[in-house]
Amino acid sequence: MTTATTLTVQVSCIRKRGSHYNPHERIEGIGGYYEGKRWYLSEDEAIRGIDNRTYQFFVSVNGHSVWVVIAAHNGRRYLRTTSDGYAPNNLLNLPECP
């Protein structure tokens, strides 16, 4: 389902996969709050949302906002942030979602 307007949402937590140490395979899902309500999407749902322009996600790092984008490694698509000049693992450094 696509919408006429893309919803811009801040990611404030992630859920990591159990024992994966590969940074390209570690995020299971992302979440946060929007209009006072908690939300959570699996990584696949978030990627679909970016692809169909339903969602645009960002992370706040040291007072700066960086976009969450789709990257690929060995044919697998995953989420990461654009380069921000700060920590290289902006998403992986977020707290765990409840």
Image: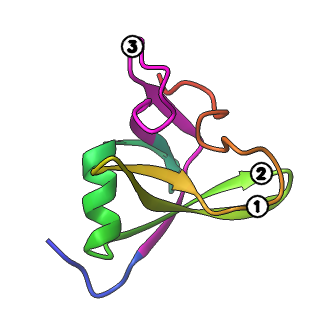
In front: label 3 or label 2: 3
Q: Where is residue 80 in the image (x, y as percent from the top left)?
A: 53, 51
Occupied quadrant, residue 13: top right
What residue does disc 2 label?
Answer: 61
Res 67 quadrant in image: bottom right
Q: Nearer the viewer, residue 14 or 82?
A: 82
**Circle 1 crowding by C-alpha within 10 Å: few under 14, some 14–19, many from 20:** some
Which region is colored magenta?
Answer: 7-30
Asked if residue 83 lies left or right of residue 47, the reply is: right
Q: In what element is the residue under mark 1?
A: loop
| Residue hosting label 3 | 18
Q: Which of the image's four quarters has the N terminus?
A: bottom left
Disc 1: which residue: 84
Q: Which amino acid does label 1 sit on?
A: Asp
Nearest-to-viewer mark from 1 and 2: 1
Mark toward the start of the polypeptide (3 vs 2): 3
Residue 32: x, y in percent?
A: 51, 43
For label 3, the SS is loop
At label 3, the amino acid type is Gly
Label whose residue precedes the other's in the sequence (3 or 1): 3
Q: In the image, 28: left or right of 69?
A: left
Of callouts 1 and 2, which one flags the residue occurring earlier in the amino acid sequence?
A: 2
| Residue shown at the point (77%, 51%) measured from the top left | 61
Q: Where is residue 73 in the image (x, y as percent from the top left)?
A: 39, 49
Measure the alpha-carbon separation of dots 1 and 2: 8 Å
Q: Which amino acid does label 2 sit on?
A: Val
Q: Is residue 15 located in the magenta-colored stretch of the structure?
A: yes
